[in-house]
Amino acid sequence: MTQTAEHWLDKIRALPRPVDTAAVRVMNVCGGHERSITMSGIRSLLPDYIELVPGPGCPVCICPEEDVYQAIQLALQQDITLVTFGDMLRVPVNSVSTYKQTDIARTLEQAAAAGADVRPIASPIEALSIATQTPDRQIVFFAAGFETTMAPVAAMLDQGIPDNLLLLLSGRRTAPAVAALLASDTIAIDALVAPGHVATIMGAGEWQFIVTQYQLPCAVAGFTAASLLAALYSVLRQRQEQHYFVDNCYPALVNDNGNPSAQQCLERQFDIMPANWRGLGEIADSGYVLKASGQGHDARRAFPPDDSDTRKRAGAMPPGCDCARVVCGQIYPDQCRLYETACTPTKPIGPCMVSDEGACHIWWMGGKRRSKTIDTKTTSS
């Protein structure tokens, strides 16, 4: 019988308090996990020694600023229709995108207001449908996301796409970013809750490096309170017993090897390259790029990006914005200097306040305002 959230919460509360540390810090990588944790009030129910730290699990937040800038430029300056997932429309860039020497837009939403043909979509199938229905129109699909987004894009390419559909690809692999964070020694993490949706594609086994390379407990979780609390109990118990392994707490959809068909689609359509993450910098083996066979659909080849002085702050966060530290788990969202004062969901300055997978947006919508300071130097193991 599937256990309830109350069951797992009781088991967590029954664990002995650690004697070797004041806090056990568990990173939840996924933005969906952070939303479930915040909206269900899990943090308020846990023993006070447990700290749940949001990680780099929001594709909108880590999409390189220069990619968003290029999408805005294409929409404004080229005779195209640009389609992208809805949250990307509100991500701000540092440099104003210009057209005919006039300041125009810092977001795709503002580009649309200035007359650009920009349309939100919910899936790659919609991009394909728009291209098929308008064969005389150049369609550019700005595709940003992790493995769960890139697998459907790869499947679409597998089936064949029309000549008038180009891809501005900004796909990223999750595990290399977590590895880079752990290797950077900029934040102390005692355990990891891995994203269930990514593990559905790539398999729970992809997270084995957390145990073997970094000697940390790890559990894969789904998105219910029960699954998240089961994963949290697992990593706390692993730490207590000093017996570390990858525990699959999402067995309904996740197995050790993942989805072979989806993985084969990704391998057929994409190469893996170093890639820039907004707030994290370049990470080895973390980006998807079109293989040579698909480069006829590469928007960057059709419309080379702007490398001029207008891009001086490429990849950086806006001035005063601490989204980079939030993404890296160095501070909580409500510790950003702009949180609540200048940056809100209705007027976001940093990308973490835009998406419903962004930690700042989630905390704001959950009613969280400024509070305690996180000690990024504390090591508890």
Image (cartoon, rainbow, N blue to C red):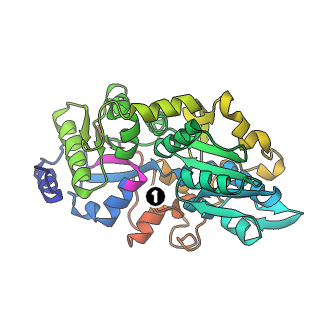
Q: Residue furthest right?
A: 100
Please give the name of the residue rendered at 61% of the width and 44% of the height, measured from the top-left corner: 170
Q: Secondary structure at mark 1?
A: loop
Q: Which percent across, then down, holds residue 235?
A: 24, 41
Q: Position of residue 188 (x, y in %)?
A: 38, 42
Identified by mark 1, the residue type is Glu
Q: Residue at x 24, y 46 (%)?
A: 231
On screen, residue 208 versus residue 114, left or right, reads left
Question: How far across and down, in percent of the image, does residue 328 sit?
Answer: 48, 47
Q: Nearer the viewer, residue 258 or 128?
A: 128
Query: Residue at point 20% right, 57% down?
Result: 47
Magenta residues, start to end: 23-32
Q: Residue at x 12, y 47 (%)?
A: 16
24 magenta-colored:
yes
Measuring from the top left, give residue 138's x and y in whole percent.
75, 52
Residue farthest toward the top in the current orientation of the protein: 212
In this rendered view, identify the residue nearer to me: 117 or 344.
117
Q: Is residue 310 left or right of residue 177?
A: right
Which residue corresponds to mark 1?
357
Q: Is residue 168 magenta?
A: no
